Image (tube, rainbow, N blue to C red):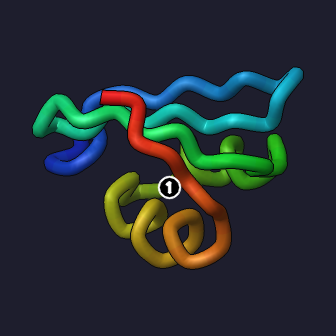
Amino acid sequence: MPSSVVAHMHYFPESAILRITYTSGAIYDYLKVPAAIYEAMKKATSKGSYLNTVIKRRFACKKIT
């Protein structure tokens, strides 16, 4: 199901970075995200809820654009 918050997500396993492209066009890298967290997000019914409750609370991020 498409997300109203997350347009795209990509995981870089070599650096443990989760890149989220929001539907607004903003892109953020979430740092030191374990692969298991990314896999769980892929399976989540609501990507936006998972992002808000699990990832944003635990992982530092930096804005790319």
Image point (55%, 24%), residue name = 10
Residue at the spot 81% in from the left edge and 41% down from the top edge: 35
Mark 1 crowd level (few <14, some 14–19, many ≥20, 10 Å Cα): some
Q: Is residue 2 visible?
A: no
Give the x, y percent position of residue 53: 48, 77
Asked whether, in this view, residue 32 is left or right of residue 20, the answer is: right
Q: Position of residue 49 (x, y in %)?
A: 36, 68
Q: 38 above or below 60?
A: above
Vertical placement of 62 versus 46: above or below?
A: above
Residue displayed at 88% across by 22% down? 14
Check disc 1 and report the residue beneath it.
44
**Residue 39 lies in what quarter of the image?**
top right
Of residues 60 and 16, the one nearer the viewer is 60
* Residue sitting at x 50%, y 68%: 56
Is the residue 44 above or below the residue 27 in the image? below
Who is closer to the viewer here, 32 or 51? 32
Question: What residue occupies the far right of the structure in this picture?
Answer: 14
Left or right of 22, for residue 12 = right
Badge 1 marks a residue whose secondary structure is loop
**Measured along the vertical axis of the image, is residue 39 above or below residue 57?**
above
Percent across and percent down for residue 25 are: 17, 30
Mark 1: amino acid? Ala
Image quadrant occupied by the N terminus: top left
Q: Quadrant for residue 64, please give it.
A: top left
In this image, 22 relative to 17: left or right? left
User: Is any part of residue 33 visible from this angle?
Assistant: yes
Residue 47 at what x, y percent from top left?
A: 39, 53
- Count every numbered label the image shows and give the total: 1
Which quadrant would the C terminus be assigned to in this image?
Answer: top left
Q: Nearer the viewer, residue 35 or 61?
A: 61
Q: Quadrant of residue 3?
A: top left
